[in-house]
Image (cartoon, grey):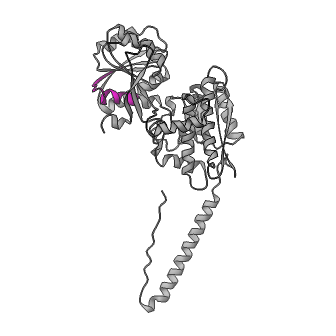
Amino acid sequence: MKKFLSLLLVFMMVFSFAGCAKQETETEATTAAAAGEETTAAVEELEWAQGITDTEIIVANSAATSGAFAPVGVPFNAGIEAYFKKINDEGGIQGRQLVFKHVDDEFDPVKGKAALSSFVEDEKVFAIVGHFGTPVVAATIEDIKSYGIPAVYFATGIGQLYNDNATDEGRNIFPVQPIYKTEGKIMIARAVGDFGAKKVGIIYTNDDAGKDLLWGAQQMATELGVELVEQQVAAGATDVSSAVTAIKEANVDFIVGAAIQATFPTVVKELAAQNVDKDVITTYVNVSPVIAQGVVNEIAGKFDVYGSGWVSFEGDRAKALEEFAKFTVGYETNVYAMTGWIAAHFFVEGLKRVDGVITWDNYMDALESAPIQNPFGGEINFGGGLRAGTQEMNLSKINPDNKDGEWVPVKELQTIESIIGK
Protein backbone atom coordinates (compact mmCIF):
# COMPACT_ATOMS: atom_id res chain seq x y z
CA MET A 1 0.00 0.00 0.00
CA LYS A 2 1.19 3.46 -0.79
CA LYS A 3 1.44 5.73 2.18
CA PHE A 4 0.56 9.37 1.73
CA LEU A 5 1.98 12.05 4.04
CA SER A 6 -0.37 14.99 4.75
CA LEU A 7 1.48 18.23 5.59
CA LEU A 8 -0.30 20.88 7.72
CA LEU A 9 1.00 24.41 6.92
CA VAL A 10 0.60 26.97 9.73
CA PHE A 11 0.76 30.66 8.67
CA MET A 12 1.66 33.40 11.13
CA MET A 13 -0.86 36.26 11.22
CA VAL A 14 1.52 38.89 12.64
CA PHE A 15 2.76 41.27 9.89
CA SER A 16 6.29 41.60 11.35
CA PHE A 17 6.83 37.83 10.83
CA ALA A 18 5.34 37.72 7.32
CA GLY A 19 8.67 38.10 5.55
CA CYS A 20 10.28 35.35 7.65
CA ALA A 21 7.28 33.06 7.16
CA LYS A 22 7.41 33.64 3.39
CA GLN A 23 11.13 32.82 3.34
CA GLU A 24 10.62 29.63 5.37
CA THR A 25 7.72 28.59 3.13
CA GLU A 26 9.79 29.17 0.02
CA THR A 27 12.64 27.17 1.57
CA GLU A 28 10.26 24.33 2.43
CA ALA A 29 8.84 24.40 -1.10
CA THR A 30 12.32 24.34 -2.60
CA THR A 31 13.32 21.43 -0.36
CA ALA A 32 10.11 19.54 -1.20
CA ALA A 33 10.64 20.13 -4.91
CA ALA A 34 14.21 18.86 -4.66
CA ALA A 35 13.01 15.79 -2.77
CA GLY A 36 10.38 15.21 -5.45
CA GLU A 37 13.01 15.46 -8.17
CA GLU A 38 15.20 12.96 -6.30
CA THR A 39 12.25 10.58 -5.93
CA THR A 40 11.42 10.87 -9.62
CA ALA A 41 15.06 10.34 -10.51
CA ALA A 42 15.20 7.27 -8.26
CA VAL A 43 12.16 5.80 -10.01
CA GLU A 44 13.65 6.59 -13.40
CA GLU A 45 16.88 4.89 -12.35
CA LEU A 46 15.07 1.59 -11.68
CA GLU A 47 15.96 -0.85 -14.39
CA TRP A 48 13.41 -3.22 -15.81
CA ALA A 49 14.26 -6.80 -14.93
CA GLN A 50 15.86 -9.05 -17.49
CA GLY A 51 13.40 -10.72 -19.83
CA ILE A 52 11.19 -7.64 -20.08
CA THR A 53 11.27 -5.66 -23.30
CA ASP A 54 9.05 -2.84 -24.54
CA THR A 55 6.66 -5.44 -25.96
CA GLU A 56 7.25 -8.74 -24.14
CA ILE A 57 7.66 -10.46 -20.77
CA ILE A 58 9.66 -13.63 -21.38
CA VAL A 59 9.48 -16.63 -19.03
CA ALA A 60 10.47 -20.27 -19.33
CA ASN A 61 10.51 -23.76 -17.94
CA SER A 62 11.97 -27.15 -18.70
CA ALA A 63 9.67 -30.15 -18.43
CA ALA A 64 9.43 -33.69 -19.69
CA THR A 65 7.51 -33.41 -22.95
CA SER A 66 8.87 -36.66 -24.37
CA GLY A 67 9.40 -40.08 -22.84
CA ALA A 68 7.52 -41.71 -19.98
CA PHE A 69 6.45 -38.44 -18.35
CA ALA A 70 5.22 -36.75 -21.53
CA PRO A 71 1.55 -37.50 -20.65
CA VAL A 72 2.09 -35.19 -17.68
CA GLY A 73 4.49 -32.61 -19.10
CA VAL A 74 2.72 -31.96 -22.40
CA PRO A 75 -0.70 -31.05 -20.93
CA PHE A 76 0.96 -29.19 -18.04
CA ASN A 77 2.71 -26.85 -20.47
CA ALA A 78 -0.45 -26.63 -22.59
CA GLY A 79 -2.25 -25.27 -19.53
CA ILE A 80 0.42 -22.60 -19.01
CA GLU A 81 0.32 -21.57 -22.66
CA ALA A 82 -3.49 -21.45 -22.64
CA TYR A 83 -3.58 -19.10 -19.67
CA PHE A 84 -0.94 -16.86 -21.21
CA LYS A 85 -3.01 -16.73 -24.42
CA LYS A 86 -6.01 -15.61 -22.39
CA ILE A 87 -3.99 -12.79 -20.80
CA ASN A 88 -2.42 -11.80 -24.12
CA ASP A 89 -5.84 -11.67 -25.78
CA GLU A 90 -6.90 -9.28 -23.01
CA GLY A 91 -4.00 -6.95 -23.82
CA GLY A 92 -1.16 -8.53 -21.86
CA ILE A 93 0.52 -7.00 -18.81
CA GLN A 94 1.26 -3.28 -19.05
CA GLY A 95 0.79 -3.68 -22.80
CA ARG A 96 3.40 -6.43 -23.00
CA GLN A 97 2.72 -9.92 -24.33
CA LEU A 98 3.67 -12.96 -22.29
CA VAL A 99 6.17 -15.21 -24.08
CA PHE A 100 6.72 -18.77 -22.84
CA LYS A 101 9.91 -20.65 -23.72
CA HIS A 102 10.36 -24.34 -23.08
CA VAL A 103 13.04 -27.04 -23.21
CA ASP A 104 12.30 -30.77 -23.02
CA ASP A 105 14.53 -32.03 -20.20
CA GLU A 106 13.17 -35.60 -20.41
CA PHE A 107 12.91 -35.69 -16.59
CA ASP A 108 16.72 -35.72 -16.50
CA PRO A 109 18.34 -33.61 -13.73
CA VAL A 110 21.47 -32.98 -15.82
CA LYS A 111 19.44 -31.64 -18.73
CA GLY A 112 17.28 -29.67 -16.32
CA LYS A 113 20.31 -27.95 -14.81
CA ALA A 114 21.64 -27.10 -18.26
CA ALA A 115 18.29 -25.68 -19.32
CA LEU A 116 18.04 -23.51 -16.20
CA SER A 117 21.53 -22.13 -16.73
CA SER A 118 20.73 -21.28 -20.34
CA PHE A 119 17.42 -19.61 -19.45
CA VAL A 120 18.95 -17.38 -16.79
CA GLU A 121 22.44 -16.64 -18.08
CA ASP A 122 22.05 -16.74 -21.87
CA GLU A 123 18.41 -16.08 -22.73
CA LYS A 124 17.95 -13.95 -19.60
CA VAL A 125 14.29 -14.73 -19.01
CA PHE A 126 12.33 -12.86 -16.35
CA ALA A 127 11.08 -15.88 -14.36
CA ILE A 128 10.75 -19.65 -14.23
CA VAL A 129 7.09 -20.70 -14.34
CA GLY A 130 6.08 -24.29 -13.61
CA HIS A 131 9.41 -25.87 -12.65
CA PHE A 132 8.74 -29.52 -13.33
CA GLY A 133 9.45 -32.87 -11.68
CA THR A 134 10.99 -34.02 -8.42
CA PRO A 135 14.45 -35.05 -9.73
CA VAL A 136 14.94 -31.85 -11.74
CA VAL A 137 13.64 -29.55 -9.00
CA ALA A 138 15.80 -31.28 -6.36
CA ALA A 139 18.88 -30.90 -8.58
CA THR A 140 18.29 -27.22 -9.38
CA ILE A 141 16.63 -25.68 -6.32
CA GLU A 142 19.89 -24.31 -4.89
CA ASP A 143 20.83 -22.92 -8.32
CA ILE A 144 17.51 -21.06 -8.50
CA LYS A 145 18.05 -19.61 -5.02
CA SER A 146 21.56 -18.52 -6.00
CA TYR A 147 20.36 -16.81 -9.18
CA GLY A 148 17.59 -15.00 -7.30
CA ILE A 149 15.26 -15.35 -10.28
CA PRO A 150 11.56 -15.61 -9.33
CA ALA A 151 10.32 -19.19 -9.67
CA VAL A 152 6.55 -19.65 -9.42
CA TYR A 153 4.93 -23.08 -9.05
CA PHE A 154 6.81 -26.34 -8.73
CA ALA A 155 5.31 -29.55 -10.09
CA THR A 156 6.41 -31.55 -7.05
CA GLY A 157 5.84 -31.56 -3.30
CA ILE A 158 9.40 -32.09 -2.07
CA GLY A 159 10.29 -30.75 1.35
CA GLN A 160 13.15 -28.54 0.08
CA LEU A 161 10.47 -26.09 -1.07
CA TYR A 162 9.10 -25.56 2.44
CA ASN A 163 10.17 -22.46 4.34
CA ASP A 164 8.24 -20.47 6.91
CA ASN A 165 10.64 -17.52 6.90
CA ALA A 166 12.13 -17.04 3.43
CA THR A 167 13.11 -13.42 3.89
CA ASP A 168 16.58 -13.68 2.37
CA GLU A 169 17.90 -16.72 0.50
CA GLY A 170 15.02 -18.63 -1.00
CA ARG A 171 12.67 -15.66 -1.06
CA ASN A 172 12.40 -16.15 -4.83
CA ILE A 173 10.86 -19.62 -4.39
CA PHE A 174 7.04 -19.58 -4.67
CA PRO A 175 5.54 -23.08 -4.35
CA VAL A 176 1.81 -23.54 -4.98
CA GLN A 177 1.20 -27.28 -5.25
CA PRO A 178 0.87 -29.10 -1.92
CA ILE A 179 4.15 -29.70 -0.10
CA TYR A 180 4.23 -32.94 1.86
CA LYS A 181 5.43 -31.18 5.00
CA THR A 182 2.39 -28.91 4.98
CA GLU A 183 0.08 -31.81 4.16
CA GLY A 184 1.49 -33.81 7.08
CA LYS A 185 0.45 -30.96 9.37
CA ILE A 186 -3.02 -30.86 7.84
CA MET A 187 -3.53 -34.62 8.27
CA ILE A 188 -2.81 -34.41 12.00
CA ALA A 189 -5.12 -31.41 12.25
CA ARG A 190 -7.82 -33.57 10.62
CA ALA A 191 -7.15 -36.43 13.03
CA VAL A 192 -7.67 -34.10 15.97
CA GLY A 193 -10.23 -31.61 14.66
CA ASP A 194 -12.48 -33.96 12.69
CA PHE A 195 -11.97 -37.29 14.47
CA GLY A 196 -11.16 -36.27 18.03
CA ALA A 197 -7.93 -38.30 18.10
CA LYS A 198 -5.55 -37.99 21.04
CA LYS A 199 -3.18 -40.76 19.98
CA VAL A 200 -2.31 -41.05 16.29
CA GLY A 201 -0.41 -43.81 14.53
CA ILE A 202 1.65 -43.00 11.44
CA ILE A 203 3.10 -45.55 9.03
CA TYR A 204 5.58 -43.79 6.79
CA THR A 205 7.93 -44.86 4.02
CA ASN A 206 11.68 -44.31 4.21
CA ASP A 207 11.69 -42.11 1.10
CA ASP A 208 11.47 -38.31 0.80
CA ALA A 209 7.66 -38.30 0.55
CA GLY A 210 7.20 -40.40 3.67
CA LYS A 211 9.78 -38.51 5.70
CA ASP A 212 8.38 -35.11 4.71
CA LEU A 213 4.85 -36.18 5.67
CA LEU A 214 6.25 -37.45 8.97
CA TRP A 215 8.02 -34.14 9.62
CA GLY A 216 4.77 -32.21 9.19
CA ALA A 217 2.89 -34.71 11.35
CA GLN A 218 5.49 -34.42 14.12
CA GLN A 219 5.34 -30.62 14.08
CA MET A 220 1.56 -30.51 14.33
CA ALA A 221 1.35 -33.32 16.89
CA THR A 222 3.71 -31.36 19.15
CA GLU A 223 1.75 -28.16 18.61
CA LEU A 224 -1.59 -29.83 19.42
CA GLY A 225 -0.25 -31.98 22.26
CA VAL A 226 -1.22 -35.35 20.80
CA GLU A 227 0.81 -38.56 20.99
CA LEU A 228 2.29 -39.79 17.72
CA VAL A 229 3.20 -43.47 17.35
CA GLU A 230 5.65 -43.87 14.43
CA GLN A 231 6.41 -46.92 12.29
CA GLN A 232 8.66 -46.91 9.23
CA VAL A 233 8.42 -49.24 6.23
CA ALA A 234 10.51 -49.47 3.08
CA ALA A 235 9.17 -47.72 -0.01
CA GLY A 236 7.64 -50.41 -2.20
CA ALA A 237 7.66 -52.97 0.61
CA THR A 238 5.49 -56.04 0.10
CA ASP A 239 5.49 -57.03 3.78
CA VAL A 240 4.48 -54.33 6.28
CA SER A 241 3.00 -56.68 8.88
CA SER A 242 5.35 -55.80 11.74
CA ALA A 243 4.67 -52.07 11.38
CA VAL A 244 0.92 -52.65 11.29
CA THR A 245 1.09 -54.95 14.32
CA ALA A 246 2.96 -52.27 16.31
CA ILE A 247 0.34 -49.66 15.40
CA LYS A 248 -2.48 -52.03 16.33
CA GLU A 249 -0.95 -52.91 19.69
CA ALA A 250 -0.42 -49.22 20.48
CA ASN A 251 -4.21 -48.84 20.42
CA VAL A 252 -4.18 -45.56 18.51
CA ASP A 253 -7.32 -43.55 17.75
CA PHE A 254 -6.54 -42.78 14.12
CA ILE A 255 -3.92 -43.70 11.49
CA VAL A 256 -1.95 -41.65 8.97
CA GLY A 257 -0.79 -43.54 5.88
CA ALA A 258 2.29 -41.50 4.94
CA ALA A 259 3.15 -43.41 1.79
CA ILE A 260 2.50 -42.88 -1.89
CA GLN A 261 1.05 -45.14 -4.58
CA ALA A 262 3.52 -48.02 -4.56
CA THR A 263 3.22 -48.70 -0.82
CA PHE A 264 -0.05 -47.30 0.49
CA PRO A 265 -2.36 -50.09 -0.80
CA THR A 266 -0.10 -52.66 0.86
CA VAL A 267 -0.44 -50.84 4.18
CA VAL A 268 -4.22 -50.62 3.90
CA LYS A 269 -4.61 -54.29 3.00
CA GLU A 270 -2.44 -55.35 5.95
CA LEU A 271 -4.45 -53.15 8.32
CA ALA A 272 -7.59 -54.91 7.09
CA ALA A 273 -5.96 -58.35 7.32
CA GLN A 274 -5.13 -57.71 10.98
CA ASN A 275 -8.71 -56.52 11.62
CA VAL A 276 -7.69 -53.01 12.60
CA ASP A 277 -10.82 -50.88 13.01
CA LYS A 278 -9.30 -47.39 13.07
CA ASP A 279 -9.89 -44.93 10.22
CA VAL A 280 -6.99 -43.94 7.95
CA ILE A 281 -6.05 -40.74 6.13
CA THR A 282 -3.55 -40.46 3.29
CA THR A 283 -1.96 -37.93 0.94
CA TYR A 284 -3.71 -36.33 -2.02
CA VAL A 285 -1.53 -38.26 -4.50
CA ASN A 286 -3.34 -41.46 -3.50
CA VAL A 287 -6.82 -40.04 -4.09
CA SER A 288 -7.47 -41.82 -7.38
CA PRO A 289 -9.96 -44.42 -8.62
CA VAL A 290 -7.14 -46.94 -9.05
CA ILE A 291 -6.18 -46.78 -5.36
CA ALA A 292 -9.81 -46.95 -4.23
CA GLN A 293 -10.56 -49.89 -6.49
CA GLY A 294 -7.51 -51.75 -5.20
CA VAL A 295 -8.52 -51.68 -1.51
CA VAL A 296 -12.30 -51.23 -1.41
CA ASN A 297 -13.08 -54.91 -0.90
CA GLU A 298 -10.63 -55.27 1.99
CA ILE A 299 -11.77 -52.21 3.98
CA ALA A 300 -15.54 -52.72 3.64
CA GLY A 301 -17.11 -53.00 7.08
CA LYS A 302 -13.80 -52.48 8.92
CA PHE A 303 -12.67 -48.87 8.59
CA ASP A 304 -12.82 -45.86 6.27
CA VAL A 305 -9.96 -44.51 4.16
CA TYR A 306 -9.83 -40.75 3.79
CA GLY A 307 -7.68 -38.59 1.53
CA SER A 308 -6.71 -34.93 1.27
CA GLY A 309 -7.36 -32.84 -1.84
CA TRP A 310 -6.39 -29.37 -3.00
CA VAL A 311 -8.75 -28.53 -5.86
CA SER A 312 -12.51 -28.03 -5.94
CA PHE A 313 -14.99 -27.04 -8.64
CA GLU A 314 -18.09 -25.75 -6.89
CA GLY A 315 -19.41 -22.17 -6.88
CA ASP A 316 -17.14 -19.61 -8.53
CA ARG A 317 -14.65 -22.38 -9.26
CA ALA A 318 -17.19 -23.90 -11.64
CA LYS A 319 -17.08 -20.65 -13.64
CA ALA A 320 -13.29 -20.78 -13.62
CA LEU A 321 -13.49 -24.32 -14.97
CA GLU A 322 -15.71 -23.16 -17.84
CA GLU A 323 -13.17 -20.47 -18.73
CA PHE A 324 -10.37 -23.02 -18.54
CA ALA A 325 -12.22 -25.36 -20.93
CA LYS A 326 -12.73 -22.54 -23.42
CA PHE A 327 -8.98 -21.96 -23.77
CA THR A 328 -7.76 -25.56 -23.47
CA VAL A 329 -9.54 -27.34 -26.30
CA GLY A 330 -8.45 -30.96 -26.23
CA TYR A 331 -7.46 -30.75 -22.57
CA GLU A 332 -10.78 -29.65 -21.05
CA THR A 333 -10.80 -32.39 -18.41
CA ASN A 334 -7.07 -32.98 -18.07
CA VAL A 335 -5.90 -32.44 -14.48
CA TYR A 336 -2.31 -31.79 -15.55
CA ALA A 337 -3.44 -29.01 -17.88
CA MET A 338 -5.40 -27.58 -14.94
CA THR A 339 -2.25 -27.47 -12.83
CA GLY A 340 -0.41 -25.66 -15.62
CA TRP A 341 -3.28 -23.15 -15.77
CA ILE A 342 -2.96 -22.67 -11.99
CA ALA A 343 0.81 -22.13 -12.31
CA ALA A 344 0.34 -19.42 -14.92
CA HIS A 345 -2.45 -17.80 -12.90
CA PHE A 346 -0.26 -17.36 -9.82
CA PHE A 347 2.59 -15.97 -11.89
CA VAL A 348 0.33 -13.43 -13.61
CA GLU A 349 -1.38 -12.33 -10.39
CA GLY A 350 1.98 -11.10 -9.13
CA LEU A 351 2.60 -9.15 -12.33
CA LYS A 352 -0.82 -7.51 -12.18
CA ARG A 353 0.01 -6.09 -8.76
CA VAL A 354 3.20 -4.32 -9.86
CA ASP A 355 2.61 -0.64 -10.53
CA GLY A 356 5.30 0.73 -12.82
CA VAL A 357 8.78 -0.67 -13.38
CA ILE A 358 8.92 -4.45 -12.92
CA THR A 359 12.02 -5.65 -11.10
CA TRP A 360 12.59 -8.99 -9.43
CA ASP A 361 12.31 -7.37 -6.00
CA ASN A 362 9.08 -5.48 -6.54
CA TYR A 363 7.55 -8.50 -8.28
CA MET A 364 8.31 -10.62 -5.20
CA ASP A 365 6.94 -7.83 -3.00
CA ALA A 366 3.73 -8.01 -5.02
CA LEU A 367 3.38 -11.76 -4.60
CA GLU A 368 3.82 -11.36 -0.85
CA SER A 369 1.53 -8.35 -0.48
CA ALA A 370 -1.72 -10.34 -0.05
CA PRO A 371 -2.94 -13.93 -0.39
CA ILE A 372 -3.64 -15.19 -3.92
CA GLN A 373 -6.74 -17.20 -4.75
CA ASN A 374 -6.24 -20.49 -6.57
CA PRO A 375 -8.90 -20.52 -9.33
CA PHE A 376 -9.64 -24.16 -8.49
CA GLY A 377 -8.72 -24.14 -4.80
CA GLY A 378 -8.07 -22.06 -1.71
CA GLU A 379 -5.92 -19.07 -0.95
CA ILE A 380 -2.15 -19.24 -0.72
CA ASN A 381 -0.29 -16.76 1.43
CA PHE A 382 3.35 -15.92 0.65
CA GLY A 383 3.44 -13.06 3.17
CA GLY A 384 6.28 -12.75 5.66
CA GLY A 385 8.40 -15.24 3.75
CA LEU A 386 5.94 -18.12 4.13
CA ARG A 387 6.62 -20.78 1.50
CA ALA A 388 4.33 -23.67 2.48
CA GLY A 389 2.52 -24.33 -0.80
CA THR A 390 -1.19 -25.09 -0.60
CA GLN A 391 -2.55 -24.20 2.83
CA GLU A 392 -6.19 -25.23 2.33
CA MET A 393 -7.18 -28.83 1.65
CA ASN A 394 -10.47 -30.72 1.52
CA LEU A 395 -11.33 -34.26 2.56
CA SER A 396 -12.88 -37.21 0.74
CA LYS A 397 -13.20 -40.91 1.44
CA ILE A 398 -13.43 -44.17 -0.44
CA ASN A 399 -17.02 -45.21 -1.10
CA PRO A 400 -17.18 -48.81 0.21
CA ASP A 401 -20.31 -49.47 -1.86
CA ASN A 402 -18.70 -48.69 -5.20
CA LYS A 403 -16.40 -51.49 -6.29
CA ASP A 404 -15.21 -49.53 -9.34
CA GLY A 405 -13.29 -47.11 -7.13
CA GLU A 406 -14.86 -43.84 -5.99
CA TRP A 407 -13.91 -41.06 -3.58
CA VAL A 408 -16.82 -39.07 -2.18
CA PRO A 409 -16.50 -35.52 -0.72
CA VAL A 410 -16.65 -35.22 3.06
CA LYS A 411 -15.24 -31.80 3.97
CA GLU A 412 -14.70 -28.64 1.93
CA LEU A 413 -11.41 -26.78 1.59
CA GLN A 414 -10.19 -25.69 5.01
CA THR A 415 -7.09 -24.25 6.64
CA ILE A 416 -5.47 -25.87 9.66
CA GLU A 417 -6.94 -23.11 11.82
CA SER A 418 -10.50 -23.78 10.67
CA ILE A 419 -10.07 -27.56 11.00
CA ILE A 420 -9.05 -27.33 14.64
CA GLY A 421 -11.57 -24.60 15.40
CA LYS A 422 -9.27 -21.61 15.81
Q: Residue lying at the far right in this picture: please name it.
A: 122
Q: Could you tell whether 215 is left or right of 320 in the image?
A: left
Residue at 34% from the left image edge and 30% from the top image edge? 189
Q: Quadrant of the C terminus?
A: top left
Q: Residue lying at the far bottom in this picture: please name it.
A: 16
Number of numbered discs overlaid on the protein picture? 0
Q: Quadrant of residue 14?
A: bottom left
Give the camera-side residue of 200 and 76. 76
Residue at 49% from the left image edge and 44% from the top image edge? 167
Q: Could you tell whether 103 is left or right of 286 in the image?
A: right
Residue 375, image x, y percentages: 50, 39
**Camera sees residue 331:** yes
40 is higher (above) or lower (below) than 60: below
- Asked if residue 129 lies in the magenta stretch, the reply is no
Residue at 46% from the left image edge and 67% from the top image edge? 5
**Camera sees residue 175:** no
Residue 9, image x, y percentages: 44, 77
- Asked if residue 185 lies in the magenta stretch, the reply is yes
Residue 210, image x, y percentages: 45, 22
Residue 387, image x, y percentages: 48, 38
Give the camera-side residue of 22 and 312. 312
Give the camera-side residue of 207 and 349. 349
Magenta stretch: give its range: 184-201
62 is higher (above) or lower (below) than 7: above
